[in-house]
C-alpha cells in the first residue's frame, strides 16, 4: 500500500468519524462510560453538595455514573486545566462559576486557559446573588444608613472580602462607581474569618450569599440589609433588594454556575447533556436542595450562557479598569 493511499484512507476515515460524531445517532450512545464532573470546589461545599444531587439524577437517566472530581485551589486553574486537556467527547465536564470565565481575564495579563477558545458552554445549573451584611450590633439598620456613613466618613467605612479580585471586592468597586462612595477594603483568606469579623464589628460590612451567611444570620449574629438582585430571594422575603433599600438603580451582584465541555465536543452530545440538565432542574428534590443554599435553578442553553458571560465580561472589564484592580 503506497503512502499516498494510506494518507487518503486515513483522511477518509477521519472524515467518516467526524460525520458520525456530528449526528444525533452519536448522542444516542452517549454516555458510553462514566461521566466525570470536574469542579474547583471542596468536597462538602454547597456547590459540591448540589452537584452530587444533580449528578445522581443525570446518572440514573443516562445509565452511567456521574463522578464528581473535586480539584480546588490555584484560582480554579487545576480544574479548568484538567478539562481543557480532556478528550472532547462529553465524558469530562467542567462545573464552574462565572468568575474564572468572565472576571479573571481582566485580573491577569496572562491565563493558562482561554474561556472562549478552550471550552464549550453546555448547560446552566444555578445562579446566586449577594446580600449586603453587617454585624447584628451594627448601628446601621438599613442600606441608607450604611451609605450615609460611607459618605460622611470618606474612605473609613471598611468592607471585607475573600481576597483581592474576588466578586465581593469587584462588586464593591462596582457599588462605589455607581454611588461615588469610597470605602476601605479588608481582604481575608478564609470565608469564616471574614464573616466572623463582620459579626464582631472588626469589619463594617461585606457581601455574602445565602449559603455563606445563613448560619450566622439565623444565629442572629449578622443582619442582612439588602439583596443585590432584581427581586427578593425566596425564604428571605423580608430583605429588600438594593434598589428597594435606596441603593443605585439596577445594581446587581450575581454569580452563576454552568457546565462546560472541552472545545470541539460534538453538538449532539452537548444538546443531550443540556436536555438532561433542563429536565433535572425541574426535579422537586433538586430544587429543594438548591433552595437550601439560596441557589436559584438556571436552565440556560449554550447560547444563553455565552450571551450572559459576554455581558458579564464587558461589565467586569469596565469596573476592574476603573478601580485599577490587578492580580499580576
Image: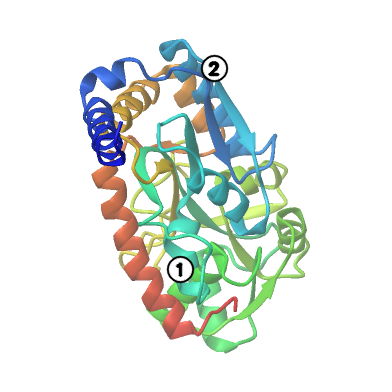
Q: Quadrant of the C terminus?
A: bottom right
Residue in the foreground of this view, choosing between 203 and 221: 203
SS of the residue at dot 2?
loop
Instruction: Kindly identify the residue that appears in the image at 51 percent across and 85 percent down.
Output: 151
Q: Is residue 327 left or right of residue 143?
A: right
- Gap between marks 1 and 2, in whole Å? 33 Å
Residue 188 visible in the shown view: yes
Q: Which mark is residue 65?
A: 2
In the rendered view, tell whether residue 203 sits above or below residue 95. Answer: below
Instruction: Kindly identify the residue that appears in the image at 58 percent across and 81 percent down.
Output: 183
Q: Is residue 101 left or right of residue 20?
A: right
Residue 145 location, x and y as percent? Answer: 53, 72
Give residue 307's quadrant in the image.
bottom left
Give residue 198's quadrant in the image.
bottom right
Neighbours of disc 2 within 10 Å: few (<14), some (14-19), many (20+): some
Residue in the foreground of this view, choosing between 20 and 61: 20
Residue holding disc 1 = 105
Neighbours of disc 1 within 10 Å: few (<14), some (14-19), many (20+): some
In the rendered view, tell whether residue 59 sits above or below residue 51. Answer: above
Q: Is residue 200 left or right of residue 74?
A: right
SS of the residue at dot 1?
helix
First in sequence, mark 1 or 2: give its number: 2
In the rendered view, tell whether residue 104 sits above or below residue 29. Answer: below
Residue 142 location, x and y as percent? Answer: 52, 63
Instruction: Kindly identify the residue that appears in the image at 40 percent across and 46 percent down.
Output: 232
Amino acid at each position: 500500500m503506497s503512502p499516498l493511499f494510506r494518507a487518503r484512507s486515513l483522511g477518509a476515515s477521519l472524515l467518516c468519524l467526524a460525520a458520525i460524531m456530528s449526528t444525533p445517532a452519536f448522542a444516542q450512545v452517549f454516555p458510553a462510560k462514566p461521566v466525570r464532573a470536574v469542579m474547583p470546589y471542596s468536597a462538602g461545599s454547597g456547590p459540591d453538595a448540589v452537584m452530587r444531587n444533580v449528578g445522581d439524577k443525570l446518572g440514573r437517566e443516562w445509565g452511567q455514573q456521574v463522578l464528581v472530581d473535586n480539584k480546588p485551589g490555584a484560582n480554579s486553574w487545576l480544574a479548568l486545566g484538567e478539562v481543557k486537556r480532556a478528550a472532547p467527547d462529553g465524558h469530562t465536564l467542567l462545573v464552574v462559576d462565572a468568575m474564572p470565565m468572565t472576571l479573571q481575564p481582566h485580573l491577569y495579563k496572562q491565563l493558562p486557559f482561554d474561556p472562549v477558545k478552550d471550552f464549550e458552554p453546555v448547560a446552566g445549573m444555578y445562579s446566586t446573588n449577594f446580600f449586603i451584611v453587617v454585624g447584628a450590633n451594627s448601628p446601621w439598620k438599613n442600606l441608607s444608613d450604611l451609605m450615609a456613613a460611607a459618605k460622611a466618613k470618606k474612605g473609613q467605612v471598611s468592607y471585607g472580602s475573600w481576597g483581592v479580585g474576588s466578586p465581593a471586592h469587584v462588586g464593591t468597586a462596582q457599588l462605589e462607581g455607581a454611588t461615588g462612595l469610597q470605602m476601605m477594603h479588608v481582604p481575608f483568606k478564609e470565608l469564616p474569618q471574614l464573616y466572623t469579623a463582620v459579626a464582631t464589628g472588626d469589619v463594617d460590612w461585606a457581601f455574602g450569599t445565602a449559603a455563606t451567611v445563613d448560619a450566622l444570620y439565623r444565629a442572629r449574629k449578622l443582619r442582612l440589609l439588602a439583596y443585590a438582585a432584581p427581586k427578593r430571594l425566596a425564604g428571605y422575603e423580608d430583605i429588600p433588594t438594593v434598589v428597594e433599600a435606596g441603593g443605585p438603580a439596577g445594581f446587581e451582584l450575581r454569580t452563576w454556575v454552568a457546565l462546560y465541555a472541552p472545545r470541539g465536543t460534538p453538538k449532539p452530545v452537548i444538546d443531550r447533556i443540556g436536555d438532561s440538565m433542563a429536565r433535572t432542574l425541574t426535579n422537586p428534590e433538586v430544587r429543594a436542595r438548591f433552595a437550601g443554599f439560596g441557589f436559584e435553578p438556571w436552565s440556560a442553553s449554550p447560547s444563553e450562557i455565552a450571551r450572559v458571560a459576554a455581558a458579564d465580561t464587558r461589565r467586569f472589564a469596565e469596573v476592574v479598569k476603573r478601580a485599577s484592580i490587578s492580580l499580576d
